[in-house]
């Protein structure tokens, strides 16, 4: 994930982050399926998707904590 993409994630709302998390989760599932069947072309893509998913969850948690403080 590039720096600009991370900056846009930080500015997105809860619903947008949930949608993005869902999309990445589906893509990750498809790649794991390809890996199991031996059709995966780029195994590093799994690693980047896992990290992207963690970033999104981190931004969601930050929004939750901000909401708790107010």
Image: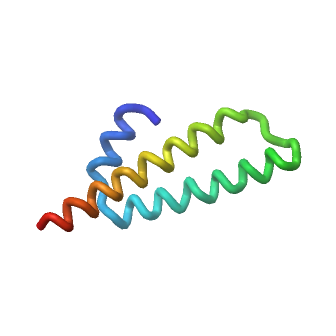
Q: Residue at x 35, y 48 (%)?
A: 9
Residue at the extreme right: 37
Corner quadrant of residue 67: bottom left
Q: Is residue 15 left or right of residue 19?
A: left
Q: Residue at x 42, y 54 (%)?
A: 57
Residue at the extreme left: 70
Which color scheme did the rendering employ for the protein?
Answer: rainbow
Considering only vertical position in the picture, is 9 above or below 64? above
Quarter of the figure that contains the C terminus: bottom left
Q: Is residue 14 left or right of residue 50?
A: left
Q: Nearer the viewer, residue 21 or 51?
A: 51
Q: Nearer the viewer, residue 54 or 28?
A: 54
**Residue 18, how many percent across, how many down?**
43, 63
Q: Residue at x 72, y 35 (%)?
A: 43
**Residue 51, how many percent across, how many down?**
51, 41
Considering only vertical position in the picture, is 52 above or below 42? below
Corner quadrant of residue 25: bottom right
Q: Is residue 15 left or right of residue 70?
A: right
**Residue 5, how many percent across, how many down?**
39, 40
Corner quadrant of residue 16: bottom left
Q: Residue at x 33, y 58 (%)?
A: 61
The number of numbered discs placed on residues in the rendered structure image is 0
**Residue 44, how many percent across, how many down?**
66, 33
């Amino acid at each position: 994930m590039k720096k600009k993409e991370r900056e846009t994630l930080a500015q997105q709302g809860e619903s947008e982050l949930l949608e993005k998390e869902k999309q990445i989760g589906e893509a990750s599932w498809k790649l794991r399926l390809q890996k199991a069947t031996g059709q995966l072309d780029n195994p590093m893509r799994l690693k980047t998707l896992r990290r992207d998913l963690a970033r999104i969850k981190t931004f969601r948690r930050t929004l939750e904590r901000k909401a708790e403080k107010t």
